[in-house]
Image (cartoon, rainbow, N blue to C red):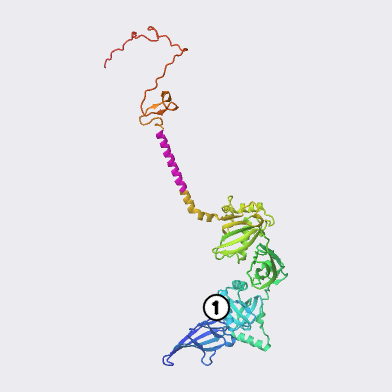
Amino acid sequence: MFLGKILLLTTATFALTPGKRSSTIQESIYVGQIYQKDVSAQSTVSIPVEENLPKWLIVANNTLQGIPSKNDIGKHSITIKTGSIMKTLEIDVKEDDSNPCGEQATTWLEVIYADDMDLAKRLFSARYVAQLLKEDIRGIRLYDFKYSREIRQVEYIGGEEDGAVVIIKPHCDGENEAIESATDDMDKLLDDDDADTEYAVTLTQGHVLSRNKASQGQNDDETTTVRTTTSRTTRHASDRPPSLVNSMNGFTCIRGIYCEALVPSTTFIDTEDGDTFNLKLSVFLLDGDKNWLYYNDKKIQGVPMKVGEYQFRLDARDKRGQMISAPFAVTVRDSPEHNHLVTMALDLTSKQNLASDAKLLVQFVKQLATVTKSKNDAVIIEEIKKEATRTVVKWSNNTLPYKTCSESGIEDMKKIMFTKQRKQMNRQFERDMTERFNVRSVNLELLGNCLSDNLDTATTVPSIEAAQESSFPWMILLAVLAVFLIVVALLTLLCTKKKVKKEKPSEFTGKGHPVVFPQEVGDDHDMDHATTPMLTKEERPPLKVSQHDNPLYKPPPPLATNSPRLGSVTSTIPNQKMPPPYVPP
């Protein structure tokens, strides 16, 4: 890491005047280094002789700050007075001829500004670059462009630019690693759209010259009146940068629909690395909006969300970071109308943003197309918006006609996304989408001519997980209620059976009351109309049955006394032999 070296030597002396104290602080700073020192709001900053600060210093936001240039080399005395305390700063501005990476060649990322800037703007630009690259501001230098070439012997390995002011950041991670790290920083700067001042970004590689060599090169420039030194245009003879062979053709996309274009292998050529696909390719938007295209697997792909004309460039870098670009244009037309709309709520992490991440949006479209068994360009992304912790995506199916409502197509979509009852998300659909995107809910809304057909106008479907979470207390309550009703029903049934069993023996009896049958009731009784047994309050004799003579019936004659049927009372017992008497042993 190339950090600024600041040497602080403090000595204090007292009693210049009664009641006052003074001290002297000595500091060293290098040309191009950003200098900052906090001062109190009540302090007065000046120099002993003149009442103006050096041109390379200003006071802003209670901070003494500045960037010394080549013309500021030497010692500067600054007085800071706060009440009765007076401090004197002795700042020694020097040239730094040390190599950040030692004997190894240093790779520098250079941010070049075409216009010269005043001190305030130089400080702002230096802080902006340091913040964008997340770099300690002491690790960068800001030079006049010509001076940056006088003190270093460098070669361009990524682009070649000229300008007035340059901010440089060194990389010392080994040759290949340093180039890769510097290239990543280069991409960050090229992707940034918030800078107020335009700049170019290049990569250089080389060494810092010693003071003697730097001054010798400077003298050579003065005698020959050549603006640039030979070290500025030096390149490795063994490694040439890639070159553009064929220009890129423009193409047309449709808003919300996946778009791709093949990159011809003959677009670039590199003597050492080979054709286009052996180089590192990347796509950049030149119009200042969010980049919605990227390079992947020999194709440029993306999902545009705005209609218009866009200017892009395709950058190709070789292994040493040397770069060449091919511009191309993309026209985005409006998407066709639709008679249905699917709204999906997604749970994404804080780092995932469908609206700004071109790769993530393409992955979502491809996943959705795979799950719905359609092609990538069948999905039209209508809208993407952030709601609290969820991302809401509205899309339609490009394969369904708009002028007529395709009932079969709508039903096929429902079968894929919903259960048969249309009340929950299909488990298979949720499982397939959750492989990469957590879908919380789905809503299918019918529009236009589909509203007049015999179809559901809207189907709101919470996910199975959400439905289970929200209905869990109700399910417990319903289960407890069902068990309670079953227990009550069983108890009621048992009580009813016992009661029936107890009533059966007393069906025809009362409390000691006799049972009277209908045929036993007299004709003059008022209960002669009864047809079933009844209870009477008082006991009565049974009804006498009248004996009617039946002329057809003749009783048999009486039996004779000697009839064998009557038997003989005086009949003798037959003779039988009695058993012998019992004799005990």
- Residue 158 vertical position relative to residue 426 in the rendered view, above or below: below
Q: Is residue 321 left or right of residue 562?
A: right
Which quarter of the picture shows residue 579? top left
Which quarter of the picture shows residue 544? top left
The tally of labels here is 1
Look at the image and say whether residue 246 sits in the magenta stretch. no
Q: Can the viewer see residue 363?
A: yes
The spot of residue 82 in percent (x, y) is: 46, 87
Which one is in front, 457 or 93?
Answer: 457
Which quarter of the picture shows residue 264? bottom right
Q: Which residue is mark 1?
A: 137
Q: Can the viewer see residue 78?
A: no
Which one is in front, 476 or 371?
Answer: 476
Q: Quadrant of the N terminus?
A: bottom right
Stretch of the chain drawn in magenta: 481-503
Q: Secondary structure at mark 1?
A: helix
Say what amino acid the circle numbered 1 marks: Ile
The spot of residue 336 in percent (x, y) is: 68, 61
- Residue 68 vertical position relative to residue 309 in the rendered view, above or below: below
- Residue 501 vertical position relative to residue 478 in the rendered view, above or below: above
Q: Is residue 262 left or right of residue 579?
A: right
Residue at the far right: name it: 246
The spot of residue 119 in percent (x, y) is: 58, 83
The spot of residue 48 in percent (x, y) is: 51, 92
Residue at the far top: name it: 562
Q: Quadrant of the C terminus?
A: top left
Which one is in front, 365 or 16?
Answer: 365
Magenta highlight: main SS: helix
Rate crowding at label 1 as few (under 14), some (14 to 19) or many (20 or more) other CA atoms within 10 Å. many
Q: Is residue 161 left or right of residue 28?
A: right
